[in-house]
Amino acid sequence: MNSGPAFMKKIIFVLVYSIAALSIFTYGKTTENKQLSYLLSGQYTDKMTEATKKLEELDTAVKKTLLFKEEEGSARAREDIWRLSSEIKNSVGSLPLDRGFSNSWMNYLGRLGNFAKESERTGNTEEYHKIMTEASKNLRNMADEWEVATSGLIDGSMTIKGWKNQLESVDSAHDWAGMTETVKKNTESDFPLTASEADSQKKKDLEKLTDKNISSDEAIERFKILFPEVSTGSIVVETSKPGSPYPFYHIRFAKDQSIGYIDITEKGGHVLSFLAERPFTESSLDFSVIQKRAEDFLSNSGFGDTVYEEARENNTAWHFVYVRVEPEYNAKVFSDVIHLKIAKDTGNILGMNAMEYIQKEETKKQPIKRINWKEFFHSNVEVINEELAYVENDRLEQRLSHYLTVKMENEGITETYKVVVDTETGEIIETEKQQ
């Protein structure tokens, strides 16, 4: 297993170089001295310190889990691995690194954390020790690759502009594609996908879309049909960058005081996301009017198989969540949702995210066993609402479930919970306290 100080030095290199790269994107037209000065500002120093601390904690957690033969001895450390890998992954995603490697590295960190958490359920300590020992070696090799790729910046032989060119594959002496492929192979060898995980990944990468490709002109027409109020102004169309899991059109627009963008898939012309920014007035429409606008938009746009689930507000807009309904059981599919942001003053659509809806889960028929809730719950618990819904369990399986809202009386205090119970097995998939 890799020694702590050497490993952490290499990881710190990654953060230093990543932050240096960030200054390029923020101050592309300033002098190099100003870029380096900004790099050393308190904001990014604090960010580096926080990330470094988490990496030290992750390294320690991995080592702790390899000390014990029994699962109980490392349970807390495995939980730390899952938490820290997720937090570090989010930090990596926010930095402007090489896109392909960044995606691969985040995937590896995610697999590392998920494996640590899932191993608590399986209880196979020998398999865990074998896989995590190999993963530790691969983490060290990844850090070595980073040192080779970025050492020129730290020793002064590479300028800020040179780093920018390297990231953009201009005069790059480093094989970023090969580096990305190495990480992918490590991910596949250390943490091979289960059948459910592979299916889930295909959905995320939109591999299951069978629609024909559309042209950029067709994407613009789709934009004009959905959002006529902002699509008649200035429009610029770009295609997604190489390395994106699926190709899409990125359309930027400006109309009067509104600016924004819409992303539409090349395959089938599906809307991934939409966002518009503009000034707001102090007027406010009734909630019922705004909700009617939302539902009319979804119906007219081909999303008529969704139903209202919840809404929340800020001072300028309402945020709605709509869930797809599977017709066999009239069951909500909580993995297939659409998010809408609607202006309070005009009722116009300000934002939309339909990524999860596009991924569309494949649901299966499932027995529905009758459950006596009075026997299932304690006497102080009352079921106040019951629906059917497809919910993903911890094995990434879509299960038809009883989706219950219950209230519990305890010493004069009433609390409300959402409880999800598998209709076939009676397994409790989720319990969540409501605010």
Image (spheres, helix red, strand yellow):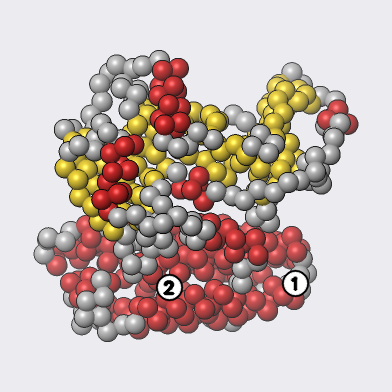
**Residue 381, quarter of picture:** top right
**Image side of residue 430 versus residue 144, left or right:** right
Q: Residue at x 25, y 21 (%)?
A: 281
Check if mark 1's residue and mark 2's residue have beta carbons within 8 Å.
no
Locate residue 266: give its quadrant. bottom left
Mark identifier at residue 125:
1
The amino acid type found where label 2 is placed reads Ile
Q: Secondary structure at mark 1?
A: helix
Mark 1 is on which residue type? Answer: Thr
Point 62% across, 31% down: residue: 434
In the image, residue 355 above or below residue 117: above
Which label was assigned to residue 299?
A: none
What is the number of the mark on residue 11?
A: 2
Local SS, label 2: helix
Is 334 on the left-hand or right-hand side of 22? right
**Which image quarter is the N terminus in?**
bottom right
- Residue 58 vertical placement versus 153 (above, below): above
Question: For this rendering, which residue is in front, 134 or 366?
Answer: 366
Question: Which residue lies most toward the front here?
Answer: 212
- Structural crowding at the residue carrying mark 2, measured as other residues with C-alpha within 10 Å and reported as few (<14), some (14–19) or many (≥20): many
Q: Nearer the viewer, residue 19 or 68?
A: 19
Which of pointers 1 and 2 lies earlier in the amino acid sequence? 2
The residue sitting at 23% across, 60% down in the picture is 25
| Identity of the residue drawn at 25% across and 71% down | 168
Q: CA distance from mark 1 to mark 2?
A: 28 Å
Measuring from the top left, give residue 69's x and y in whole percent: 76, 73
Along the line of sight, the residue nearer the viewer: 145 or 67: 145
